[in-house]
Image (cartoon, coloured by chain):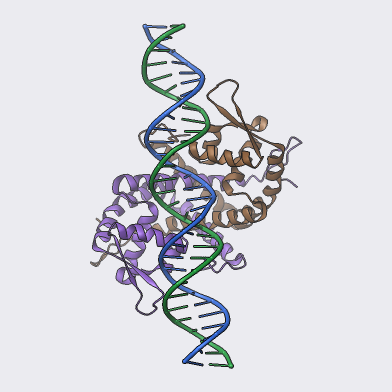
Chain colours: A purple, B brown, C green, D blue
Amino acid sequence: MTTDVATHAPAKAADPRLGSWRTFLHAHARLTRRLDDELRASHGLSLAEYDALLQLAQAPGRRLRMSVLADRVLLSRSGITRLVDRLVADGMVERSTCTTDARGAEASLTRAGLDRLRAASTTHLEGVRRYFLDTIAADDRQAMERGLCQVMDGLDDAAPASSQDRADA
Amino acid sequence: MTTDVATHAPAKAADPRLGSWRTFLHAHARLTRRLDDELRASHGLSLAEYDALLQLAQAPGRRLRMSVLADRVLLSRSGITRLVDRLVADGMVERSTCTTDARGAEASLTRAGLDRLRAASTTHLEGVRRYFLDTIAADDRQAMERGLCQVMDGLDDAAPASSQDRADA
DNA sequence: GTGCGATAGTTGTGTTGTCAACGACCTTCC
DNA sequence: GGAAGGTCGTTGACAACACAACTATCGCAC
């Protein structure tokens, strides 16, 4: 019944595929830590902040509803509020109320934010290429992407009931 | 020179491989969130706590030096102190000073901790299999593992100078 | 054996995230 | 047109982590 835990008794053989899972976790942890460190050191931006600026820059009009931004940056609604707070305090983003829906707020990229992003993107993309894209063989990378897309599809299917939030999309 | 950022000008074509990177980040975020939620809901354990218990269970004598545990669970030294604090408070782990090195502390798994781990492992491993191992084709999974191992090797090589801590393995 | 740099773990403090509760607003249906 | 119920974003309270500073101990040169 127990599966992986070392038992004093004979001990069941663990699923040999579990090494892949551990590799996945470790690679992600170390990779994001390294990239985050580099980005902070050279441009004073966290990975999440960089990502938010990037999403805004790519959006039409360089502006996005808070909730849309939250989804793209993988943050909760309250998390995006606070992230945008910081970016506004640093002059990289401006907040405005949505014209078509008075409940809503929009974040828009300022000139300073765009400049900051441009500068940072050089460093960041170089890191992503060096540590990730250029390191993995092309077909391995494609296999990985294929596999992980299926993982995400699987997560969508087995939607966890409904918590009003972040359930799908 | 700018690479990915949407420019008003012609806009450089972004590296097409960048989608793989984003997929990697999203898959990890959603996967760990799902597994963490499930583990908390069914057994009141976080992923980090589960991992710590597992590492202890697999260690000889079911005990480990704090710093070794920190490395395996991918936590800082202070992070592991506090995590073990919580586990001790819950009676799953005991702390003892190391006999051979009076500076050192050891964490050892209690009977209750082992039982808790065993119960949780059923749930957790089922999740890992369902969402990850069984979802990805075997050869894709192996390709991914191969690629990510190379990523980690690459990170080791380009060691970030030296910060005394967590630099290598 | 004594002094000194390195190492182990803990603690104070700050950062960044979550969840639950809230107010403001939209929508729909009567 | 006005109540009922949903959605949007913010806030308060809190959890979990990192870093830096600290204490205690080790190991070694001398």
Q: Mark yes or no: residue A19 visible.
A: no
A62 to B40, vertically: above or below? below
Name the spot of residue B54 as percent of width and height, x first.
Answer: 63, 41
Q: In this picture, is A87 found above or below B122?
A: below
Q: Nearer the viewer, residue B157 or B48?
A: B48
- Residue drawn where x is 29% and y is 46% of the image: A42
**Which of these two is toward me, B128 or B41?**
B41
Q: Nearer the viewer, residue A36 or A102?
A: A102
Compared across the picture, whether B17 is left or right of B115 comes to left
Q: Is residue B128 visible?
A: yes
Residue at image coords 29%, 60%: A92
Q: Quadrant of the N terminus of chain B?
A: bottom left
Vertical arrangement, residue A107 with respect to residue B130, above or below: below
The residue nearer to you, when weighing B107 against B12, is: B107
Residue at the spot 57% in from the left edge and 28% down from the top edge? B105
Q: Position of residue A141 (x, y in %)?
A: 46, 53
Residue at image coords 39%, 77%: A102
What is the number of callouts on the image? 0
Query: Is C17 situated above or below B84?
Result: below
